[in-house]
Amino acid sequence: MRGQWFLVSAVVASAALLFISTLATEFFVVDLSLFPRMDEPYVFENVVRNLNETVVNYILLSPKERALRIKEYIEFVSEKLGGRGYYLEIVNETSLESIPIRFKITLLSERMNITKTVIFP
């Protein structure tokens, strides 16, 4: 009779440990599929690169025309990203008519907040 209780208690203990370990794996396993779905860093770097290209491409224009083109780009990209669920704020910290131009760029989404200050020639 003792041997039967030993076997029954061993089975119950094993089942309890198995149940606890299956519950605990949900807390310790990292979901690697989450990171490729987050494209905020990629979007942010594209905005920075394209803003730099816009400044460089229009550097030979008159200061007022250059400021107008940069403002058009900022409005365009803010509108397009707004449609995708992002909030983009680009604040020029210097005059758009002077060179170099310093921008503070902020990209907000439900999952992430990225802010960077850049200086373009």
Image (cartoon, rainbow, N blue to C red):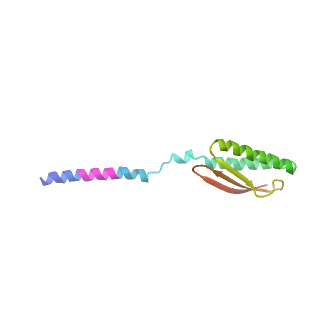
Which residue shows up at 66% across the image and 44% down it?
82
Query: Residue 81 at what x, y percent from top left?
Result: 66, 44
In this view of the protein, which residue sits in the foreground, 29 or 79?
79
Farthest residue to the right: give it.
Answer: 62
Give, as a single range, the part of the protein colored magenta. Answer: 11-20
Residue at x 68% of width, y 56% of height: 116
Q: Which of the two residues, 56 or 81, is positioned nearer the viewer here?
A: 81
Q: Is residue 58 visible?
A: no
Image coordinates for residue 12, horizontal then vertical, percent: 24, 51
User: Residue at the location (35% across, 52% down)?
Assistant: 21
Left or right position of 104 against 16: right
Dividing the image into 4 quarters, which one contains the C terminus?
bottom right
44 falls in the magenta region? no
> Front-most of 94 and 54?
94
In the rendered structure, does residue 16 fall within the stretch colored magenta?
A: yes
Instruction: Point out residue 63 in the picture as x, y percentages from the top left corner.
Output: 86, 51
Give the residue at x 50% y 48%: 32
